[in-house]
Amino acid sequence: RPAGGRGARPGAATVVLTGGVRTPSDSLVGPVADRAIDSLHFDVLFLGVHGISAEAGLSTPNLAEAETNRRFVRAARRIVVVADHTKWGTVGLSSFAALEEVDTLVTDAGLAPELRAEIEEHLPGLLVAGDAPADDRT
């Protein structure tokens, strides 16, 4: 019987790579997950972060999660970080990517205008949820 359980297609298999560790953010991390990521290639990586700053880049308080995230970043052609305004200026224990490695930051309208300008100095794309597209502004 397929590993997928009830309702699984005949012959289909379900594979879950946990690496044996679940962080407080419910991320799947660890050596098994890291090895699996090393064999993959991503067109676009959408990544949530604990903290983001010009100095520390992207960071997390969890060392295992930092290593897994480093591997995701290396495997991706484009990196899109999704982080609300409260993440800006927060620095976790371990950095896993420089801000310049990010292609686009998606954030919310709570990000102060001066911070938007600072972010735009470091990366090519900033999308603010709730803002009207530049063509629609009057």
Image (tube, grey):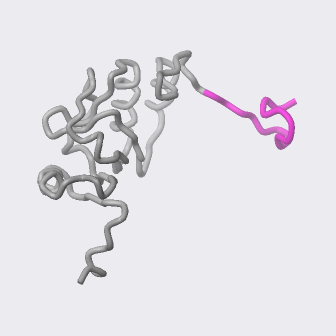
Looking at the image, residue 60 lies above or below residue 63: below
Which range is magenta? 1-16
Point 35% across, 37% down: residue: 49
Looking at the image, residue 78 lies above or below residue 27: below
Point 56% across, 15% down: residue: 20
Point 28% across, 53% down: residue: 110
Compare residues 12 and 62 and report the one nearer the observer: 62
Residue 39 lies in the magenta-colored region = no
Instruction: Tell how many labels.
Output: 0
Q: Is residue 92 left or right of residue 64?
A: left
Q: Position of residue 78 (x, y in %)?
A: 34, 50
Point 34% across, 47% down: residue: 84
Quadrant of residue 59 within the rendered picture: top left
Q: Position of residue 43 (x, y in %)?
A: 42, 51
Quadrant of residue 68 within the rendered picture: top left
Residue 8 lies in the magenta-colored region = yes
The secondary structure making up most of the magenta span is: loop
Looking at the image, residue 15 lies above or below residue 87: above
Residue, far bottom: 138
In the picture, which quadrant includes the C terminus?
bottom left
Looking at the image, residue 55 lies above or below residue 133: above
Q: Position of residue 136 (x, y in %)?
A: 30, 81
Q: Position of residue 48 (x, y in %)?
A: 39, 40
Q: Is residue 82 left or right of residue 117?
A: right
Q: Is residue 61 left or right of residue 45?
A: left
In the picture, which quadrant includes the N terminus?
top right
